[in-house]
Image: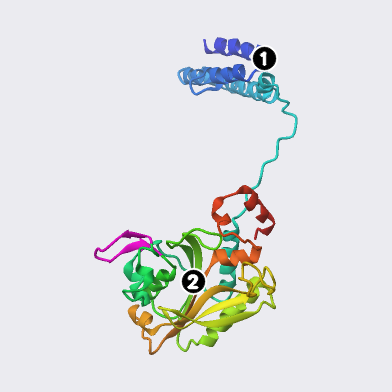
Amino acid sequence: MLQDKITQYTAEINAFSTDKADELEQFRIRFLGTKGIIKDIFEEFKAVSPEEKRSLGKVLNEFKQLAEAKYQSLKEHSDGTEVAADSGLDLTLPGEGFDVGTRHPLALVRKEIIGIFERLGFVVAEGPEIEDDWHNFSALNFPEEHPARDMQDTFFIKKGGEKGDIALRTHTSSVQVRMMEAGKPPFRAIMPGRVYRNEAISARAHCFFHQVEGLYVDENVSFADLKQTLFYFVQELYGEGTKVRFRPSYFPFTEPSAEMDISCTICKGDGCQMCKHSGWVEILGCGMVDPNVLENCGIDSKRYSGFAFGMGIERIANLKFEIRDLRLFSENDVRFLKQYKSALI
């Protein structure tokens, strides 16, 4: 009878004792498992008469609670004892410490740059790293004979085709083109991302690096707006008192164009390898968006004007953290990365 089984198993549970994890697990499977004794008894309970159910129901619940309590009691007493005995470990000793991960210095600088421009009302825009000729070159006013279109400067994936050459993007300016094609002014955005160029790897250059480019297009945008925006950026990033100078330059997609230098943060203007002993370091290129670029993207250049700028995150990080070798950023040397725990933001 069912009552006899419960009595028999109750005595067995009360008599059971162990400090070994494998024996306790066998106990759990035998009594509390999905195919265990308690489940079988509950199945038998469904078939008894209503009169027996009234008397057996309470007994059956107490039997189940007894098995669960026995298992929990022995589990708390035996946790780890078998492992400790077999391995000779003292599990009462404190555990060994482990290194906490840190954010990469480039990620730290990227976040800080984005934060500065977001305070000026810029939004973040992203685009594909594999680009066609139109978005990477033609829409940005690059002539057919421009050196950047050569194999020596660009990693091409496919030559020719309906969309022209397909290549790894050489700058994030392609995101600017996609933004202007897809919407209407005003635009105020920055475009962070990885770019690729076929360059020899050295302390000052790499075949891939990271950029942040910016674009502001609206009515009556002037070069003065560009200068004031970038001056604010430098003071926020490097601190008040950092000197700034603009030099005339040339880029196919801006006119007029300039390169912006800051006083070297490593030698404080005295001259070092980073600044080539000049006291100045170039950190970005900029200029007013060429009217041809606006027209290529379907924007009326007689009504709208704008400025654009672009900088390498590695160069910014070099100056901010006084890192002299660009290759350190991609070598994943833990000794190098550990230095930036205190720089977490």
Pick whichever of labels 1 and 2 is earlier in the sequence.
1
Instruction: Residue type at mark 1: give it.
Output: Ser
Image location of residue 147, percent across then percent down? 37, 71
- Helix, strand or loop status at disc 2: strand
Q: Nearer the viewer, residue 344 or 319?
A: 319
- Helix, strand or loop status at disc 1: loop
Image location of residue 258, percent across then percent down? 51, 81
What colouring style does the render use? rainbow
Which stretch is magenta? 155-169
Q: Nearer the viewer, residue 205 or 1?
A: 205
Q: Is residue 265 above or below residue 339?
A: below
Q: Is residue 245 above or below residue 72?
A: below
Q: Is residue 23 above or below residue 158?
A: above
Whether residue 298 sits left or right of residue 35 in the image: it is left
Whether residue 229 sits left or right of residue 321 in the image: it is left
Image location of residue 291, percent across then percent down? 38, 84
Image location of residue 329, percent across then percent down? 56, 56
Circle 2 sits on which residue? 213
Tell me the residue at 36%/71% (across/down). Answer: 137
Tell me the residue at 35%/68% (across/down). Answer: 149
Main SS type for the magenta part? Answer: loop
Whether residue 180 sits left or right of residue 3 in the image: it is left
Q: Which mark is residue 17?
A: 1
Tell me the residue at 38%/63% (across/down). Answer: 152
Camera sees residue 136 = no
Instruction: Residue type at mark 2: give it.
Output: Glu
